Image (spheres, rainbow, N blue to C red):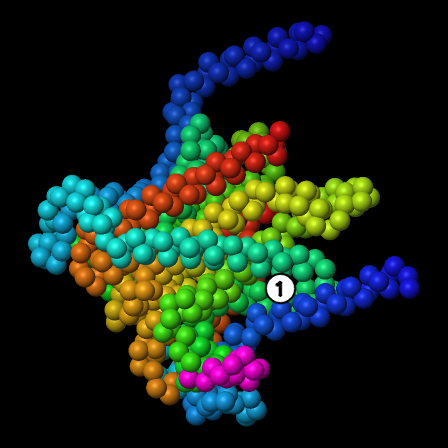
Amino acid sequence: MRAAGEIGATKALARSHAEASPFNFRAAVARHSLPYALIAPALLVILGVLGWPLVMLLWLSLQHYGLRELFQHQGTFVGLKNFSTILADPQFAYTLRTTIIFTVVNVGLSMLFATLIALLLERVSRFVRVLLGAGLVFVWATPVIPAVNLWQWMFDYEFGVMNWLLTRIGAGNYLHHNWFENPLQGFSVITVIVVWGAIPFLAISLHAGLTQVPRELVEAAQIDGARAWQVFRHVTVPTLRPLLLVLFSLSTIWDFGVFNQVWVLLNQRPAQDYYLMAVFSFQESFRVSQYGLGSAVAVVMIAILVVATFLYVRQTVRSINEGGA
Amino acid sequence: MTTSMVGMRSKILWSVVGWLVVFVFFFPVLWMWLEGLKTEPQAASSPPTILFVPTLSEFQEVLSGDFPPFFINSAIASIASTLLVLVFGLPAAYALAIRPVKKSRDVLFFFISTRFLPFAASLVPLYLLARDLQLLDNILALILIYTTINLPLGVWLLRSFLLEIPPDLFEAARVDGAGFRHEILRIVVPLITPGLAATSLICLIFSWNEFFYAVNLTSSVAATAPLFLVSFISGRGLFYAKLAAAATLASLPVLLAGWIAQKQLIRGLTMGAVK
């Protein structure tokens, strides 16, 4: 009975295949190519508006492209000359060093404070948690330009509330103190702004990640006599590894490419001491009208980021594989 | 003393720390809101005016002045680019989630890899392209760029929402002989509406806040809200209250969208490392 039923089913299947094949063939092709047809438009947009400029950038970095060439719509091929020029430029060396230090400090501080706030969020009462969460979202959602305006004017040498506050609490005489006379102080202010703006997203993500750490694991560790720090080090961090890697690489990309904060804070005319890579590339291109040199700087910037984040990404893939195994 | 009392005390202690963090962290935004409610002389006084009668006159002045065109440009760029992200992104996300092909993983990786490009790097070529296409100071250029910047994230997010639709539903529909159209209209659209809303909000926020391309590719006709705010700085003088009022207005749409979409936002930005 069962065997007969199976044979019957097979026959019916074979028949339906044979009958359907002439016009089902077209349907099958349509079915098969449908995914490609659906992906293609999005892919084309990205290749056109993001991929093509990237190819152009590489090509521009190999050309002499100044004001004259800008009007002629045609650069002169010079090979790797732009790269040798910028590598010999002391300003480039200074900018690269500054940018790397700036990135390390900013990523480090952002991640540190974000982690502390995420841990704090777990320990406070519900009310304070909602309050803190709201504060984080508000800061996060404040667009970067108003935010920089805000800080600029809190650090203003004449009307700034910071100078008033610091003088008031007895930290010294800060009245009419110009924070941007000394690049180290200036970069400290920029760091405050960048870290302040970066914390909300990092802290909220980390807090969301923390809620996913299995409770049993933490409790088991506590029963075994692990201290808070040990639990954090041996249970929390390994569980959050993929998230931490994503956050580290995103922060690195963002902080390495900082432009807006410097640009707006220094009234769109930053002194050379304040050049970060993005600002330098911009100035070479649009202020000095050496688009070839500016492009070369941008290419170096991308190369460094690719190398730095490639390691991160490989690590992420590895840790996800380990987690899955 | 019992353990619960110790627990209570540490909880109160942490809450006090929490309040402090909220205050320090939130202070700049609060300060902005307050300054917008002051008059110009009050806002520019040193030491700062703490006690004052709030007034909405600066808000009125900003709204009746030259701010609205910038605001409208921002709205056009954000809304149009968001719609385009959905138009291009939803089909791609559908294909990647529901009908994956051999190369789906590579395509997905390609989409994500675009997030590893610094903005500043593609400015020069985009500037030259926009010039050649006569798109300088044209809102269309910004719409195109914002669409492209948001598209990878949009595809990624929409795909993660589509993956949550139980595969059985599609199976059942196919067994019933439902066509592609039916599948989209009856299953995908109703179930993905929250996902669409969240993705839209995130795209809106990003394009609303974007400054770098806007400042370099537009000047007067197509300038967006952030540019208006920067124009205050070069002017300086006694415009602090007005600047604060404008900044508050410019951040208002984003505050609302951010509050509504915060959960999805984290999920999108961490590329799914947080669900």
Question: Which residue is depicted at the point 36% across and 61% down?
Answer: A259
Is residue A211 on the magenta stretch?
Answer: no
Q: Is residue B36 visible?
A: no
Which of the 4 image quarters holds residue A280?
bottom left
CA neighbours of label 1 inside 10 A, class few (<14), some (14 to 19), many (20+) = many
Q: Residue extending furthest front?
A: A172
Give how far across and how far down residue A94 sits, in percent.
31, 56
On screen, residue A160 versus residue A3, left or right, reads left
Front-most of A127 and A311? A311
- The image quarter containing residue A257 is bottom left
Task: Name the residue at 38% across, 55% down.
Answer: A99
Q: Is residue A317 above or below residue A172?
A: above
User: For residue B216, which quarter of the picture?
Assistant: bottom left
Whether B49 is drawn above or below B232: the answer is: below
Amino acid found under the numbered disc labelled 1: Gly
For the N terminus of chain A, the quadrant is top right
Nearer to me, A141 or A250: A250
Side of B98 where A215 appears, left or right:
right
Residue B224, position as x, y percentages in the image: 34, 68
Q: Is residue B5 left or right of residue B121?
A: right
Query: Please, what is the dominant secondary structure of the magenta stretch?
Result: loop
**In the rendered image, which residue does mark 1 sit on?**
A133
Callout 1: residue from which chain? A
Query: As drawn, is B232 to the left or to the right of B137?
Result: right
List x then y, in percent, for residue A82.
Answer: 19, 47
Going 34% across and 59% down the picture, which residue do you hit?
A276
**x then y, percent, for residue A156:** 42, 80
Judged from this view, the residue extending furthest toward the right is: B1
Q: Which residues are magenta?
A: A164-176
Q: Is residue B101 above or below residue B7?
A: above
Which of the two residues, B40 or B251, is positioned nearer the viewer here? B40
**Residue A71 visible (yes or no):** yes
